[in-house]
Image (spheres, grey):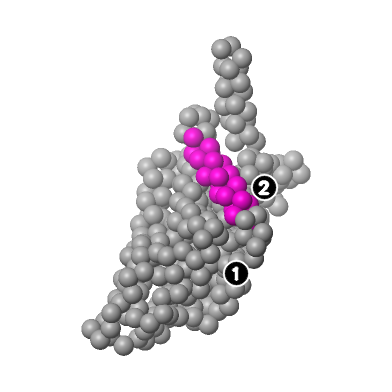
Amino acid sequence: MDLVNCTRVEKFILLGFPHVRGINGSFFVVVLILYILSIGGNGLIIVIVRINHHLQKPMYFFLSNLSFLEMWYTTTVVPKMLANLLLARTTICFYCCMAQLYFHFLFGVTEFFILTVMSFDRYLAICNPLRYTTIMTSSVCLQLALVAWFGGFFSILFQILMVVRLPFCGTNIVNHFYCDIGPLLTIAGGDTHLIEAFNFLIAVAVIVTSLLLTVISYIFIISTILRIPSTSGQKKAFSTCASHLTVVSILYGAVLFVYLRPSATKSSFSHNKAISVLNTVVTPVLNPFIYTIRNNEVKAALWKLFGRKASTLRNV
């Protein structure tokens, strides 16, 4: 089928979740609360890193980038998802759908790169502590962050351009709560094998390569930690990377299941929806708690911030 021989749809209908009376309303409240916590928690991390000079370190610079990505990654999906829970079916214009698809993958792919850079940062801090400050300068940190962002920008750009050119002339019902690549290719006309192959190659290049680099970094990190003579020294060293390792485990576990498949159109969309809820709603709200609960410097900065506000209110 060619665009010349058909009238392309102007909007898509997002099928969303099966509507069960009473359950959707409760699910809406839960998702809304988690979304607010995600935006508030990640935003708070950005603020405290920005205003606290004790946190002006490479580790927290990259953490701020991660929090910023999490805020926008979930924002590209959750507002439309909340509307879907209220209205049963929601519509989205064609180019709005393409924009949602692009930015969702942009922030997601960039997040993988930032997590990989964070693992490299932890490797240097633990395995080469004497050279750490001379290697991880502010300019190097900025360059690494820019590489991650540009990598996310270009890795998904050509794929989206190919999807935009597909003839969407039949059904316009997308079996998902947002514009994901698999459901869109299912309803697209024409030959999608090239896009599916390209999608799989991008997934391998981004997910597997970043995961492999992270695993290699942690092999060296754990090897170095095990050579530390004292138990207290081992615990202190491991505590500096435990939060990052936890976040990596959660994120990669969810994404590997959804995207690392040769055919995006033959996956179970019902299972993908459940995993997508975990990936776009639950994981972004966990990250701030993981990094604050296990990080004494962040907890100290939070106590200092809220303690100062409390004393100011008492003096008013």
Q: Position of residue 8 (x, y in %)?
A: 30, 77
Q: Identify the residue shown where x is 65% and y is 49%.
A: 242
Q: Position of residue 94 (x, y in %)?
A: 34, 68
* Quadrant position of the N terminus in the picture: bottom left
Q: Position of residue 28 (x, y in %)?
A: 59, 54
Q: Identify the magenta region.
A: 27-47
Q: Amino acid at mark 1?
A: Pro
Q: Classify 130 as above or below 21.
A: above
Q: Position of residue 247 (x, y in %)?
A: 60, 54
Q: Identify the residue shown where x is 51% and y is 29%.
A: 52
The residues tagged by marks 1 and 2 sit, at their Cα atoms, a distance apart of: 44 Å
* Residue 31 covered by magenta stretch: yes
Question: Which residue has dot 2 on it?
Answer: 238
Give the structural element (helix, strand or loop) at label 2.
helix
Front-most of residues 80 and 258: 80
Front-most of residues 154 and 175: 175
Give the structural element (helix, strand or loop) at label 1.
loop
Q: Classify 213 as above or below 40.
A: below
Q: Identify the residue shown where x is 60% and y is 69%.
A: 18
Front-most of residues 1 and 172: 172
The rendered magenta stretch, by its main secondary structure, is classed as helix
Q: Amino acid at mark 2?
A: Phe
Question: Which residue has dot 1 on it?
Answer: 18
**Residues marked 1 and 2 touching at CB (< 8 Å):** no
Nearer-N-terminus badge (1/2): 1
What is the residue that sits farthest to the front in this orientation? Answer: 21
